[in-house]
Amino acid sequence: MTAAALPRLELPSVYGSPVRLDELLAGGVAVVVFVTEECPTCAMTLLRLAAPAGDLAAAGISVTAIFEDPLEVAARSARGTGFRGTVLSEPEPYELSRLLQLQSVPTTLLFDAEGSLLRRVVGWDREGLDALLGQASALAGAPAVLVTGEHPQRKPGCAAKNTYDPETLAILNAAGPHDELEDMFERGWSDGLPVIPPTRERVEAMLGGRDPSLSLGEVPPAMGEATLERVASCAVLAGCRPEYFPVVVAAVQAALEPAFNLNGQAVTTQPAGQLVILNGPARHSLGLNSSIGALGPGSRANLTIGRALRLLISLTGGGFPGKLDRATLGHAGKIGFCMAENEEVSPWEPLSVQRGFEPGTSVVTVVGCDAPLSISDHRSATPEELARVLAAAAAATWSPNWWPLGGASLFVICPEHAQLFGEAGWSKQRLREEMFEAAQRPAGELRWGETTPLVHAAPDDRPISKWCSVEDILVVVAGGEAGRYSAVFGPCLGMQTEIVSKEV
């Protein structure tokens, strides 16, 4: 067997059954590139050959990448570069590489229908690859295919693994293949859960042509700059799809408003996280869940949009537990919290309209809040009774004797509860007023444990409300249409944080 012919060997394929190499010549011409995952020049070569590979395949030319890596690594690397040809894996002891006398990777080879080697390009060589692809096109009787894009004219590669001595190979094998998910943990680019590596290609897709250097402001508490590139990187890490990005940007803009006081929320010992609420048509176009399990798992859009904001706060703002984030307990919403209002079943105007936006507008509202407290009520028969139940549950939030709160409470009313109020003709404002009136207690009953200066100064019989005003009560409708479970989110207190809304 000489180095001038394609051996009749069989290699594992990422697509299923092994492939015999002479089968690559069925179309008459074969382009084969040898690569390895840990070589940056190999990654660049596969990335730049991705589009030409499709053109060559359309002309009947076989294009194959042979990795000197395990199958799972080959599959991940090829997918990450967008390479669309055949992907094979050559196991140790790299017999094929040795027969073809490979000294470094990437090495790109051109074979004719008889398996004869016609041309060899070592490393990245733009002119050499153009000549190789042009010759392949000519042999197939197809228009010339060229490498396109901005990149260096030449770049050396790495040593092929068949050239390694046994001791070096043993060390490499003991270390195992590179695991990019573990690498993200080691870099600290995580919230404790696995993340998606923010490759250049993924970040560019997330940006969608936007100016990556455009700054949305500084992210407290460390005041790192929220360029669109960094926001896009966090969106990739979180698992967002590119179409979610406008909502992520609007949420970031809202959270960075001075009135929101993200700095206070990010460093406090309180458990406060940031809840993102979406209203308007974007709920449907992006597939957000506002129905069954609206506050829980199962929806990629809900979870990753909220997570993208939190990753920006942690990674760019430095608000990470044990570092600048000093939350005593925290809560699951600090990983990522995003919901959509179920406007279709609500008897009332959406939260966005209540906050001054036109109907039919996609709007993000960001709320600094505690974890939700579930409120079960399957027996109230009148709206007055149900309003008292909801108010009584909210009375326990923050601290049972801290009256008034001095901050806003968000109620998520389930469809069955909302229906009871709607059928009685109650407006959202009427519900808020009734809850405000129902959540009152004499000051004398509140003088134990943690209490407010107002309670200490008031006569025993003076009624104290849980809220300073009706405006501190926010109401949205969400959840499945079966089950009488609503929820209330306690506020983030003591730092004058306001609720902020932004149009998407």
Image: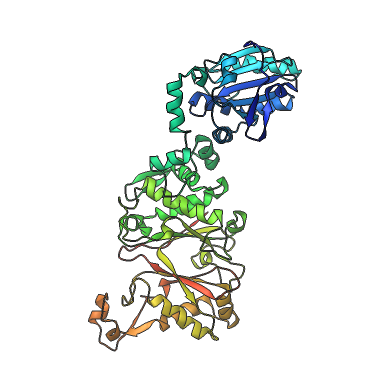
* 415 is higher (above) or lower (below) than 496: below
Please indicate whether residue 492 sits to the left or right of residue 151 in the image. Answer: left
Residue 127 can be seen in this image: no
Q: Residue at x 44, y 41 (%)?
A: 182
Residue 475 in view: yes
Q: Position of residue 112 (x, y in %)?
A: 71, 15
Answer left or right for 418 relative to 487: right
Q: Is residue 22 left or right of residue 492?
A: right
Q: Position of residue 87 (x, y in %)?
A: 62, 30
Q: Quadrant of the N terminus?
A: top right
In the image, 487 versus 193, the foreground residue is: 193
State whether residue 69 is above or below residue 129: below
Q: Position of residue 220 (x, y in %)?
A: 34, 50
Query: Residue at the spot x=32%, y=77% of the render?
Result: 403
Relative side of 474 to 76, left or right: left
Q: Nearer the viewer, residue 3 or 225?
A: 3
Residue 232, above or below 439: above
Residue 129 position within the rendered picture, expressed as x and y whole percent measured from the top left: 60, 17
Question: Which is nearer the eye, 231 or 270?
Answer: 270
Quarter of the rendering containing residue 17: top right
